[in-house]
Structure formats: C-alpha cells, structure tokens
Amino acid sequence: MKYIITESQYKTLIEQKVSKKELFQELIDEKLEYIYGFCDRTLPSENYSGDVGFGSCDVIDIIDKIVVDEVSMMSSARTDMSGKLYDVTPSIYVKLTINLHSASKIYDFDDLVYDLKHMIRKSTGIMVVFDYRINNTFRD
C-alpha cells in the first residue's frame, strides 16, 4: 500500500476527524512492522524494496514502540541572490518518543530514524523532519 499526500490533501485530512498524530502514528507503525519483517527475515524477498539499512536491524529488537508526540506543518521560503523567490517547500515536523528496553547505555537510533524518514518521504511525497527522544523502560 502506498500513501501519497499532496498539500491540499493534507489540509483536507486535517479537516477530517483523523488527527495528524493518528495518521503519522499509523504510518510509523506500518513502517516499523516492515523493518521488523525485513530484519527477522519473515518479509518475502519480493516485497523488499532496498530501503532498510543494517543499522536499523541492530536496534530494532530493543524497541517496544515509537510514539508520535507532535506533528506540525512547516514550510520554507528562500530567495536567490537577486531576490527572486524559490518555490516554497512544505514539510512536516514530527516529534517522536522511542520507547525501548535495554540494559545498554549506548543508543544510536539515527540509522533507524533515517530509514523511517525516507520510507515516509517515498510513500507520501512530503519532506519529513524527525526530532526524537529516548525513553528506556529497562529496570535493574
């Protein structure tokens, strides 16, 4: 299944009962299941599209859930040297909490977040910026 969301459709989604957080939570959950399937070798090889890195597989087993905390629409406008306005590039800022269970104190989820960002960009067509924090539920 492929989600393609244009800016006008994004505004329509906002007006509907589906919240932005729920929409992106669903996307994140779907992409995590895809990554789990690839890393556990349960995903059929014909369904793999070459978008999961080995760094994601290194940390996927300790992740309980990734929770979408906040979703905001952003746009950037810039000008060239002569003052001519470039096209405005819409993007979405998503604040995440990565819930995990690990006795290790070394966490690097940049590869996983990178893979998620590009998977969502590929499926929606919208630039996504992730900001994440880590919540370790492991107790001694």
Image (tube, rainbow, N blue to C red):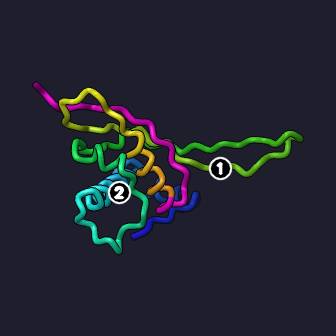
> Label 2 sits on what residue type?
Lys
The residue identified by callout 2 is 31
Q: Position of residue 64 (x, y in %)?
A: 22, 44
Image quarter of the C terminus: top left
Residue topped by disc 1: 89
Q: Residue at x 35, y 74 (%)?
A: 46
The quadrant of the picture occupied by the N terminus is: bottom left
For the record, the magenta segment spans: 122-140
Q: Residues within 10 Å of mark 1 (few under 14, many from 20)?
A: few
Kindly identify the residue that appears in the image at 36 percent across and 32 percent down.
133
Residue type, label 1: Thr
Q: Residue furthest left?
A: 140
Label 2, secondary structure: give it: helix
Q: Is residue 132 magenta?
A: yes
Task: Give residue 72's mark.
Answer: none
Q: Quadrant of residue 63?
A: top left
Q: Residue furthest right?
A: 82
